[in-house]
Amino acid sequence: MAEVTYRPARIAGSVRIPPSKSAAHRALLCAALGKAPCTVAPIDTSADMYATLAGIRAMGVQADFTDGVVKLTPGEAPTEAVTVDCGESGSTLRFLIPIFAALGIEATFIGHGRLPQRPIGVYTDLLPQHGVSVETAGGLPLKISGKLTSGDFSLPGNISSQFITGLLVALPLLDGDSTITLTTPLESKGYVDLTLGVLRDFGVTVQETETGWRVPGGQRYRADAYTVEGDWSQAAFFLSAAAIGGGPVALSGLRMDSLQGDKACVALWRRFGLEITEQNGVLTEENPRVDEPFHGLHGISIDAAQIPDMVPALAVTAAFAEGETVIYNAGRLHLKESDRLLAMEAALGNLGADIRATEDGLVIHGKAHLAGGRAEGQNDHRIPMALAAAGCDCTVTVTDAESIRKSYPGFYRDFKAIGGHADVVDMG
């Protein structure tokens, strides 16, 4: 176990945002399902990426990973049952289950951390209706056998969009046409839009309907090479840091026309009071009022239904913003790598913030400064990264510092490159 201590700092500089984990998962799987070699780059060396690559290899595809480039070469699908270790990656697990089912590969899926307890009931309900046997005691391990058949797949829209993405990627492989019918309004729409965009890039057609999508069967994935865009959810940590630590900070590697829902971070931090400009593909953020009371920030109301991953970073900014910030429609955060709502309530509360978790969000009354202190990282990668911004104002020590390897292993390096203080100590 490691812990990181952040100390007050004024930050300024530039960061190249790492490739989008969300886009990379999707691109790697689409490339792996093609019938010809394909390269996907850049890919970060995060634990979640290694989990997806392990799953791809279990499909019988050769995946060579060197210097941020993955070369995928088709192979023979296994004829014997395989075990797929999804690590702690919910995306890996929920994307791969229907893909293995569509390919007819008998597989047992396992995982670590909180992943074995995270919801998968959508698949245990749906897959047996379409020719797949499912064995589970309620979580992981989960065993599937049989071959997925086409038809109508009905599921709620207010669950994790990862289930919808898994089906959208798998159903084009089937012999017949299928439909996905949502029984409630769609949440996390940006992630589904991202999936549809990557599918188009690989030549796969999906038709939107009034209640979901129609997915023609018998399609083929085609691409020789794919470039992964930067990760807007990681950009949020630097927007929060600039709001409290001043800036200017220039962020490159992001697509301004991205379909990622987390691109909404620009509008949200502008509402807090951060100045953000874009020129030639570089996003520059600065808070010239950082020395004013409450860092010149003010509280806002945030509907997090489409942007759940940004809530930790938003909560930290809100803790320093004058007035009240209410974050709502974030109930699914109870089921992430940690219970993120309770984890952020505890972490920021330990630092002196006025914060209260609700059933579906957070209520925060900002303070001009926090006292600082020690916070639990809860083995959740987004918590130590979010609290870096608080460390621009006060001294903060966070446990489970190594958890950032899950999604952004270079975060401490990049934070220090813009003047942040991040001292990491290995406790084990």
Image (spheres, rainbow, N blue to C red):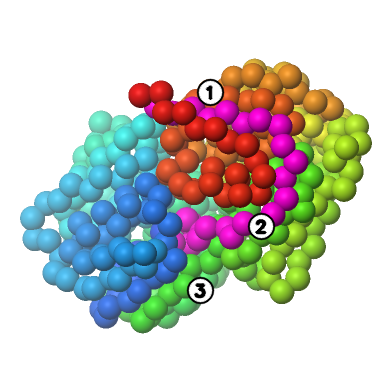
Q: Is residue 421 left or right of residue 229?
A: right
Question: In the image, which is nearer the foreground, mark 3 or mark 1?
Answer: 1
Percent across and percent down for residue 173 are: 30, 70
Tag 3's secondary structure?
strand
* 381 w.r.t. 425: above or below: below
**Element marked by disc 1:** loop
Q: Choose between 39 and 336: the one closer to the eye.
A: 39
Foreground: 249 or 267? 249
Q: Nearer the viewer, residue 329 or 39?
A: 39
Q: First in sequence: mark 2 or mark 3?
A: 2
Whether residues under marks 3 and 1 lie with C-beta atoms below 8 angstroms apart, the answer is no
**Residue picked out by circle 3:** 207
Q: Is residue 102 left or right of residue 313?
A: left
Q: CA distance from mark 1 to mark 2?
A: 29 Å
Give the mark nearer the N terminus: 1 vs 2: 2
Give, as a single range, the part of the protein colored magenta.
1-24
Q: Circle 1 is placed at which residue position?
A: 376
Instruction: Return the x and y of residue 244 as percentages of the image width and height.
Output: 76, 39
Density class for disc 2 (Cα within 10 Å; few <14, some 14-19, many ≥20) is some
Label disc, if present, on residue 14 of the rendered structure = 2
Against 99, is 94 above or below? above
Q: Is residue 18 magenta?
A: yes
Quick check: is 326 in the magenta stretch?
A: no
Amino acid residing under circle 2: Ser
